Image (tube, helix red, strand yellow):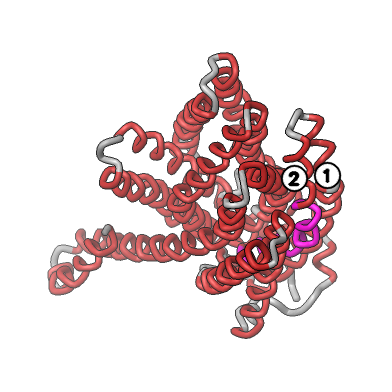
Amino acid sequence: VIYQLLRKRPQRTRPLRKKCRVHKERAPSSGAYTQLHQLIYQMLWLCRHQVMAQLMVFLVSFVSTVFCGHLGKTELAGVALAIAVINVTGISIGSGLSSACDTLISQTFGSRNLLKVGVILQRAILIQLLACFPCWAILINTEPILLAVKQSPEVARLSQIYVKIFMPALPATFIYQLEARYLQNQGIIWPQVITGVVANLLNALINYIFLYVLGLGVAGSAWANTISQLSLAVMLYSYIIWKGLHKATWAGWSWECLEDWDTYVHLAIPSMIMLCAEWWTYEIGGFLAGLISEVELGAQSVVYELANICYMFPLGFSVAGSVRVGNALGAGDTEQAKLSAKLAMFCAVSVCLSVLVGILKDKISYVFTYDEFASVAASGSIIRGAGKQKVGAICNILGYYGVGFPIGVSLMFAAKLGIMGLWTGLFTCVFLQSSFLIFYLSRMNWKKATVEVREQRHNTQVFI
């Protein structure tokens, strides 16, 4: 809507350009308006494709859960718990570590040092593959861990079956995350959408065959998810090679990828903490729901999956904001970075709020709750694009584990509100987080951030 309204105005202002020669003070506003118009278009374009790409990735595990829901309550609980374990001890770790690319690749690409982008990707691949080993060590002991936290023995057994089958797909999942970030931080999103659609069609077909034709049960669902994750990585890699999307930034494997790991890790660890502190809270909610009953666990799983779908819209703007802020800082354009941050926040909140006011006009209280989630998503991405992951990590740890989680657990068990109490605590946390992050970004010194990026680029310059 914003884009369509703005799209018409430049055509109306064209005849006025001649008058600008007489009234020269009006020319800057016209140029500034054109820049704003361009930036909004780029932001909406990135957001639209990113929402579709993220939705495709999410649907792979969601479809598996839906298929297993028809097998029975115990099977649904086992699969839901297995996916939670995989997310906590695997996917979240890889996704957090790869978030360093949101800073390094976006800023490096913005500075037009294209070959260094390929070196950063090589470095990230090696670090991600090494991260698989501690994740595997935990995943292989899923059943004992679940029994230790008082989960149902049958549910724990089914979860272990699912996790063991999925383990070979973990490196492919990590590589896919890097491939996606490598492309999206260059403003390339469409390949993820195409490969995601194909992978989801394949996933649904395999789930149907394994569960209803061959009757493999939970193991069949796990194999379907594993094959789908492998196909995502392979298809996206093949698409990149086929279309030559790597040619400008890839000069082959270089010894440079073995150097300067401290710069990557310095950003990757806070990024991982920032993401995991948030992600783990919701997954731990599933474990706590399992302590009450299998029905509560199933309900928490369904609510969590639906919340993830709603989260896709602010997530799209958050990625767009991260890319634009990182590119602008890398190019040394302070004003562009500042404007991109403001637009990301404005678009994420206003668009999500407008949609929900129309859909949920009879339940207006939920609209304001969702507004806070949109603010946190957008501001968190801007912090990643600016390389301020430590601030985000501290905010998430204190917010979720100092405020949200204690309140949620107290209401869940002491007040006997079940998962409703848990989500009440989480909403409280998100409100406080959004307030702090908006205040921090409003006080941020963007000129200093630009200078820091320039100094880092000069200190780690790569010539190939």
Q: Give the range drawn in magenta.
A: 162-180
* In the image, residue 144 above or below residue 67: above
Q: Position of residue 435 (x, y in %)?
A: 45, 31
What secondary structure is marked by label 1?
A: helix
Q: Is residue 188 visible?
A: no
Front-most of 195 and 275?
A: 195
Work out whether residue 409 or residue 209 is closer to the camera in this orientation and state it.
209
Q: How crowded is mark 2: few (under 14 residues within 10 Å), some or many (20 or more)?
A: many
**Considering the numbered disc 2 on the image, is that residue within a helix, a strand or a loop?**
helix
Identified at 86% across, 53% down, the residue is 133
Which of marks 2 and 1 precedes in the sequence? Answer: 2
Horizontally, residue 460 falls left or right of residue 200, namely right
Amino acid type at image mark 1 = Ile
- Local crowd size for mark 1, using a 10 Å CA cut-off: few (<14), some (14–19), many (≥20): some
Query: What is the quadrant of the N terminus in the image?
Result: bottom left
**Residue reaching furthest to the top:** 414
**x, y percentage for residue 200?**
57, 67
Prevailing secondary structure class for the magenta stretch in the rendered image: helix
Position of residue 202 measured from the top left corner of the image (x, y, whole percent)? 60, 71
